[in-house]
Amino acid sequence: MSPTPTAAPAIELIGIDKKFGAVHANKNINLTVAKGSIHGIIGENGAGKSTLMSILYGFYHADAGSIRINGQNTVIQDSQAAISAGIGMVHQHFMLVENFSVLENVILGVEGGALLGRGVSDARSALKRLEADYGLEVDPDAIIEELPVGLQQRVEILKALYRGAEILILDEPTGVLTPAEADHLFKILGVLRDQGKTIVLITHKLREIMAITDTVSVMRRGEMVATRRTTETTVEELAELMVGRRVLLRVEKGPAAPSDVVLSVRNLTVKDGRGVTMVDNVSFDVRAGEVVGIAGVAGNGQSELLEAITGIRKPASGEILIHGKPVTGFDSARLRALGLGHIPEDRHHMGLVLGFEESENSVLGYHRDSRYGRGPLLDLDACREDAKAKIEKYDIRPPNCRLKTANFSGGNQQKIVVAREIERDPALLVVGQPTRGVDIGAIEFIHRRLIAMRDAGKAVLLVSVELDEIRSLSDRILVMFAGRVVGEKTPDTGEQTLGLMMAGIAA
Ligand SMILES: Nc1ncnc2c1ncn2[C@@H]1O[C@H](COP(=O)(O)OP(=O)(O)O)[C@@H](O)[C@H]1O
Ligand SMILES: [Mg+2]
């Protein structure tokens, strides 16, 4: 093979424009990605990143613009054309056949990739080579649904490489991975790049961009706002470009002024559906004017503790008091009436009804309030007026209270829940994983609202698996391990110390 006289860029997108009805998802986008580089595309939810890459992969058609691959004008009308042009994509949601083996998934749909005879043994050796070349070990005979997500993702990558991909697009690949799996993925991407592949990594995590990309482009509200060499930018600059204003990556707060006890949990034991003890004789208080954070690795009883406190799960024994009044076993509606606000961990299952319009979710759980209805009927006009005010105050986008909640991005859905619970002005706010799946602009906003609640004299109980979040918001930290509170620490306690407690190693 003779060397290319001028190294053409692997990818050139020229004037790409795309509308979905009224939504202008990509506005005249230009992007150049050098061969053999890792290029990051960063932007908040809804910025247009997936749309742009779906156009490159032939999944959507641009309304205008053109694409060059290795300097050649290339029309990509479908993903088959993208594959022929050497482009592979690892989607946000895997596209694997769950009950097929790794090998079957890899060769599925490849031209001439017969599932029988020589085709399979050839594919098996090709797969072995790919695994060896790129450090992508995975058992070819394992059934997909039995593999952890990190390995399923590896199969997606193998599948693309097997099809001859020279350009690999990964859309938010670490959203489903543990930190260790993510680090492993980054090593693999580094190897692929060093062997000449071109990688486009979509993410909204600044840390990932800084860790592995060579260059980075920032998208904001459908526009490409900047491209930088990664070594020549900072997380602060990228955050500002993403959000369009300066973003505080740290939470600013003064000292707490705790007063009366609002929530008391006494010797609480909670069992799960199978009768397994998940919360084991836990006691603590939360006072007005403080944030008490519960740190812990997911699955150590935090969810069941929150469920018991918020009336979703009946405790096996022990007592819960609000303002000194026993409320053990009360249902959510009664607890709300006593001043409990709840931002649930899982907004899709407990916080929102996605098929309802935004204005309805904006009053969900409080719809029997006199201000939203007359008798049994919901006053839709009152709900919508109320929703509009919250949309404005919480900068919920798009600002349309008639839109189905399913059509809002994750960060905006979370803001709908946060607005609903905070605007009720509860005396006690119980918060689970408030920023899971939320982008940085919204994280900053939600953190500020929580601190403002504290400063207004509310009691805030925060559960999060993000240790940074616990440390920056809490005034006191309780660490949970195996259903027990194994210690209480101040927020200036080092990450290592807390980490050891979370692992059950030190008290
Ligand atoms: N198939 C679609 N139909 C209608 N609107 C869409 C569709 N796909 C994306 N959008 C809208 O286009 C905008 C950009 O979305 P997307 O490209 O998914 O953003 P990102 O990947 O940066 O989060 C959003 O407002 C989104 O709601
Ligand atoms: Mg996306």
Image: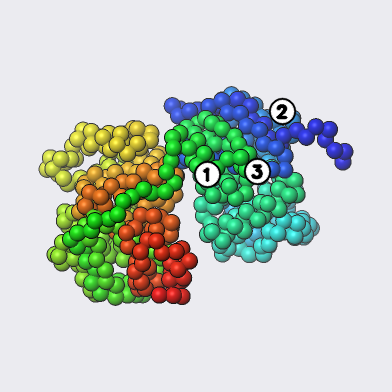
The circle on residue 235 is: 1
Residue 399 at x, y = what percent?
Answer: 35, 32
Residue 318 at x, y = what percent?
Answer: 23, 73
Binning the other alpha carbons within 10 Å of mark 3 as few (below 14), some (14 to 19) or many (20 upward) gives: some
Describe the element under mark 1 as helix, strand or loop: helix
* Badge 2 amino acid: Asn
Q: What residue did someone put label 3 on?
A: 214
Residue depth check, mark 3 versus mark 2: number of the one nearer the observer: 3
Q: Are marks 2 and 1 in contact (CB under 8 Å)?
A: no
> Which label's residue is closer to the chain start, 2 or 1?
2
Whether disc 2's CB lies below 8 Å from ligand 1 is answered: no
Q: What residue did someone put label 2 on?
A: 73
Which residue in the rendered view is the most extreme toward the front? 255
* Badge 3 amino acid: Asp
* Badge 1 amino acid: Val
> Which label's residue is closer to the chain start, 3 or 1?
3
Number of callouts: 3
Where is residue 118, by image quadrant?
A: bottom right
Binning the other alpha carbons within 10 Å of mark 2 as few (below 14), some (14 to 19) or many (20 upward) gives: few
Binning the other alpha carbons within 10 Å of mark 1 as few (below 14), some (14 to 19) or many (20 upward) gives: some
The circle on residue 496 is: none
Q: Tell me the distance, in whole angstroms, between the alpha carbons under discs 2 and 1.
A: 35 Å
Nearer the observer, 151 or 248 = 248
Is 63 located above or below residue 70 in the figure?
Answer: above
Whether disc 3's CB lies below 8 Å from ligand 1 is answered: no
Q: Are marks 3 and 2 in contact (CB under 8 Å)?
A: no
